[in-house]
Image: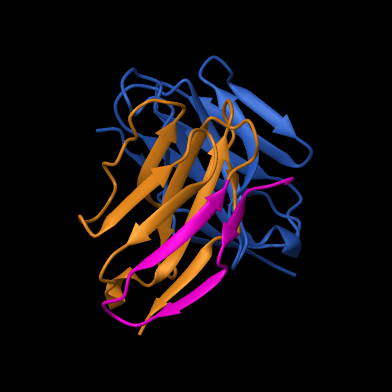
Chain colours: A blue, B orange
Amino acid sequence: SQKIEQNSEALNIQEGKTATLTCNYTNYSPAYLQWYRQDPGRGPVFLLLIRENEKEKRKERLKVTFDTTLKQSLFHITASQPADSATYLCARRRDAGGTSYGKLTFGQGTILTVHP
Amino acid sequence: GAGVSQSPSNKVTEKGKDVELRCDPISGHTALYWYRQRLGQGLEFLIYFQGNSAPDKSGLPSDRFSAERTGESVSTLTIQRTQQEDSAVYLCASSFRSEAFFGQGTRLTVV
């Protein structure tokens, strides 16, 4: 079965530092990986998507990498701010055939706390 | 509407009662997902609808859980004979191509 794991339950960093979150997957590489942010009491919000053939993707202070050899994606927040504190989730989409095509599976999430 | 809408936002029910949760996806989104999130936990996949294909029900935890979707429109998640372990936030999401858009969730409390 396809699994997706986020190794760290929680990450605490100081304001201004770079936060790095890890997402690992099993079996074959998905066509792309997605990253979401979830604030308490809210539904997840999409942040970034990186495709299998892309090594790196950037959006403002966010950077995502995709390493198909390591079967891993790294999510970086540079110049972190207390407002970045939230749970960050990675997700893979099933892109094989059958009724599950397109099914999104999420990792357990990493709780990021940025201290002022 | 502009986003995914879920109702009710909160539901308190007595153990043993049936509940029905509703999700209105974004218009035109062919895919619809239901997830369960217990306090402090990750998203647990329940069921996935894609267009007119048979749904992927592999995440439903027991036969007390069922879900329907009308075409590419509204979906309802029904939990029969609720138990305290069913207490959680139930999240619905819809998508067209890749990114999923989530509703605010229904917080279900079984007392």
Residue A28 is drawn in which quadrant?
A: top left
Res. B43 in view: no
The residue drawn where x is 58% and y is 25% is B97
Image quadrant in which the N terminus of chain A is located: top left
Single out the residue that lies furthest toward the right: A60
Residue drawn at 48 percent across, 74 percent down? B11
Up/down of A54 relative to B85, above or below: above
Outermost residue toward the front in this view: B70
Q: Is residue A86 above or below residue A31?
A: below
In this picture, is A91 found above or below B107? above
Does the magenta-highlighted stretch encompass residue A17? no
User: Of all residues shown, which one is farthest toward the top?
Assistant: A53
| The C terminus of chain A sits in image quarter | bottom right
Q: Quadrant of residue B17?
A: bottom left
Left or right: residue A77 compared with residue A79: left
Residue B48 on image: x %, y %: 40, 39
At horizontal 37% and vertical 72% (from top left) the residue drawn is B87
Depth order, front residue of A71/B86: B86
Image location of residue B55, percent across then percent down:
34, 34
Residue B54 seen in this snapshot: yes
Give percent across and percent down for residue A61.
Answer: 76, 42
Write the start and end of the magenta stretch as one range: B1-24
Say left or right for B96 vs B109: right
> What residue appears at the point 59 percent right and 18 percent down from the top-left corner?
A54
- Most foreground residue, A16 or B91: B91
Residue toward you, B46 or A47:
B46
What percent of the width, then of the height, locates residue B38? Answer: 40, 66
Q: How many marks?
A: 0
User: Residue B7 magenta-drawn?
Assistant: yes
